[in-house]
Amino acid sequence: TQLLEQSPQFLSIQEGENLTVYCNSSSVFSSLQWYRQEPGEGPVLLVTVVTGGEVKKLKRLTFQFGDARKDSSLHITAAQPGDTGLYLCAGARGGGADGLTFGKGTHLIIQP
Amino acid sequence: EPEVTQTPSHQVTQMGQEVILRCVPISNHLYFYWYRQILGQKVEFLVSFYNNEISEKSEIFDDQFSVERPDGSNFTLKIRSTKLEDSAMYFCASNLLGYGANVLTFGAGSRLTVL
């Protein structure tokens, strides 16, 4: 069974600070995705990383896929209250039919 | 922007009753999925569906569950005899392509409460 461990589980910081969220596994994934989920809604895809060592930027968010494709990180620069939410990582083993393995998520609170 | 639509948004049912959750995937997508999320827990894969048949299913997806694409637009999840532990948020998702990175679009979910 493939597992994705996310850390920290909860994080509360002040507006303007930087933060990093980690997603780790002992298994190799063909791709890894980061989602954001609001209460009572479905996950919304933020980014997909495919190549080992790949770095993608989405405004103040930087996503990195580990060289061995077993882990990933999400770094937020100068966090804003609008960044508050649940961030999920999910790994895919192969093609379109494969189910994603989700982590438990990181609950992020950015205080004004 | 195209979206995945799910109905009902919330359903309350008695234990042992049959429940059908409905989804309208994005029209040109080829792969369809059901996931569930028990309150406070992680999102879990149930089943994937392609070319009118199940492609992959998890150990959660036992004989009580079935999926169907009755027409060209709907994708349904049926739970034959609901149990208390089936109470969860059920998410439908669809994916355009079957290769490379999975880019799933999720619906807003159907909350199932089994009493």
Image: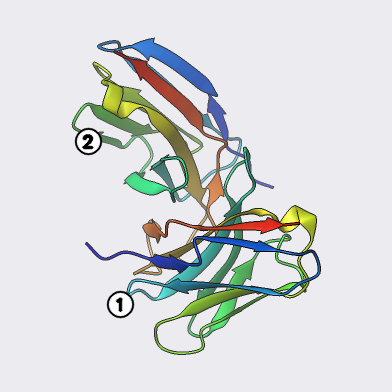
Q: Compute the Cα span from label 1 to label 2.
A: 27 Å
Q: Secondary structure at mark 2?
A: strand
Left or right of B31: which side holds B41? Answer: right
Residue B83: image location, x then y, percent: 79, 61
Q: Residues within 10 Å of mark 1 (few under 14, many from 20)?
A: few
Q: Residue at x 63, y 40 (%)?
A: B41
Give the camera-side residue of A30 and B54. B54
Q: Which residue is denoted by mark 2 in the rendering?
A: A58
Q: Is residue B15 visible?
A: yes
Tell me: residue B72, above or below residue B20: below
Tell me: residue A11, above or below residue A82: above
Going by the numbered disc 1, the residue's amino acid type is: Asn
Q: Secondary structure at mark 1?
A: loop
* Chain at numbered mark 1: B
Quarter holding the C terminus of chain A is: top left
Give the camera-side residue of B89 and A68. B89
Residue A13: image location, x then y, percent: 38, 11
Q: Which residue is denoted by mark 1 in the rendering?
A: B28
Q: Residue at x 43, y 14 (%)?
A: A12
Q: In which quarter of the view is residue A57 placed? A: top left
The residue lying furthest to the left in this view is: A59
Left or right of A71: which side holds B11? Answer: right
